[in-house]
Amino acid sequence: MKDKISLAVIRRLPRYYRYLGELLANDIDKISSKELSARMGITASQIRQDLNCFGGFGQQGYGYNVRYLHDEISNILGLQNFYPAIVIGVGNLGTALIQHLNFEKRGFKLVGIFDVKPSLVGLNITGVTVQHIDELEHFFETHRPKIAVLAVPRSEAGPIADRLEALGIEGLWNFSNGDIHLKTEIPVENVHLGDSLMTLCYRINERGK
Amino acid sequence: MKDKISLAVIRRLPRYYRYLGELLANDIDKISSKELSARMGITASQIRQDLNCFGGFGQQGYGYNVRYLHDEISNILGLQNFYPAIVIGVGNLGTALIQHLNFEKRGFKLVGIFDVKPSLVGLNITGVTVQHIDELEHFFETHRPKIAVLAVPRSEAGPIADRLEALGIEGLWNFSNGDIHLKTEIPVENVHLGDSLMTLCYRINERGK
């Protein structure tokens, strides 16, 4: 059943996962689609439809078992995989990502950090030591990272992505704002922070009318 | 016509805007929905449907006028507004947002930066001086910022948001990962970076099956 889930539904799962995690943290173990709907700001019918994709964990007139649903979504997303991940670029953004994102709760384990600046080499960030980007090839031989987080300037994203692809990287989380054209079809998640800022501009604009 | 556009369509506009901007940068002044579809990885019919919401800028058998479409989307989003914006919190994330996001191209102008740490006060980031958070009330009297970017720890997001709301802020761009419950219905754009990391985990997982 799983392989028929659309990416649109998949993209909503992390959000369910976050909300269910908060419910668990507040010792709430059952919730109706109606209550969940009110909390998340999406319709109850959308929630039922989404969760039914996985065989439906809710029971009529009873609600969802929060722990079960939370764990199932974790399984579907594969959050227990601890896939090895590396971060390329430790400017402010790369450093912020390393410090604030708990990779281990999101399916990955941070195993390497790389930068081109010699002055950053040797720096320890959350227990991982920054290496020079020239060490990348050697590092792959022993650690086989699955994904790379690209926190490099736009102009460097393309060449680094090509190099990572040649080394056998399996996915990219791209913060560089640059277009990446790869030879293979490995998954790339592009993050464009400015998009939601523009949406905010529109929303403020509309309210002022 | 504008006020009937769904937020789902609005959320796709920044993406069109980015792609059209790249076309302009490459001196491409006409494009068919088919070509745009191939570049953006969304269906041509979706593109036609989205752009028709605004009265349709394309002509059959001719394609879209890139410059015109780019400018119209900019008008719809209100990107020429230069609404005054402030950033709260200049840790790595706040600093990265200030340095890498061109606010002026996205509808805003950065007019103030605040932090709670005395050691950061007086620091100049891209021409704006960091002030102590205690100056917030005074600053509002003279500058009336419309939005605040929250790059503060999760635990501080709620109190800061309440304070900003009382001061009359009109929108929040929230990077704190924390829930914000406001009294009024001002627009809040929550950014959860971890969500796309979890999606990437799923996609890698699926490919490995």
Image (tube, coloured by chain):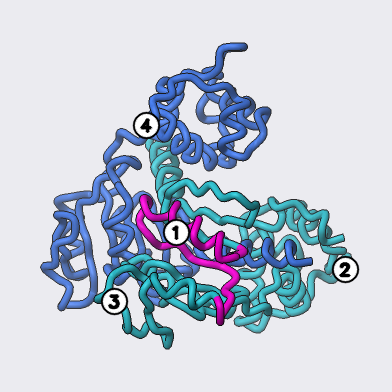
Chain colours: A cyan, B blue
- Please, which chain is the residue tagged with disc 2 on? A
Label 4 neighbourhood size at 10 Å, few (<14), some (14-19), many (20+)? few
The label number, if any, that marks residue A120 in the structure image: 3
Observer-side mark, 4 or 2, equals 4
**The magenta stretch spans residue A196:** no
Q: Is residue A39 visible?
A: no
Three-letter amino acid code at disc 2?
A: Gln
Q: Are marks 2 and 1 on the same chain?
A: yes
Q: Please report the residue visible at 73 percent of the width from the left and 62 percent of the height from the top.
A: B207
**Mark 1 lies on residue:** A160
In the rendered image of this protein, does residue B180 appear above or below residue A102? above
Q: What secondary structure is marked by label 3?
A: helix
Q: What secondary structure is marked by label 4?
A: helix
Q: How many marks?
A: 4
- Please, which chain is the residue tagged with disc 1 on? A
CA distance separating discs 4 and 1: 23 Å
Q: Please report the residue visible at 62 percent of the width from the left and 57 percent of the height from the top.
A: A187
- Please report the bounds of the magenta region as a residue range: A141-170
Three-letter amino acid code at disc 3?
A: Leu
The label number, if any, that marks residue A83 in the structure image: none
- Judging depth in this view, the residue of A117 and A5 nearest the camera is A117
The label number, if any, that marks residue B25 in the structure image: 4
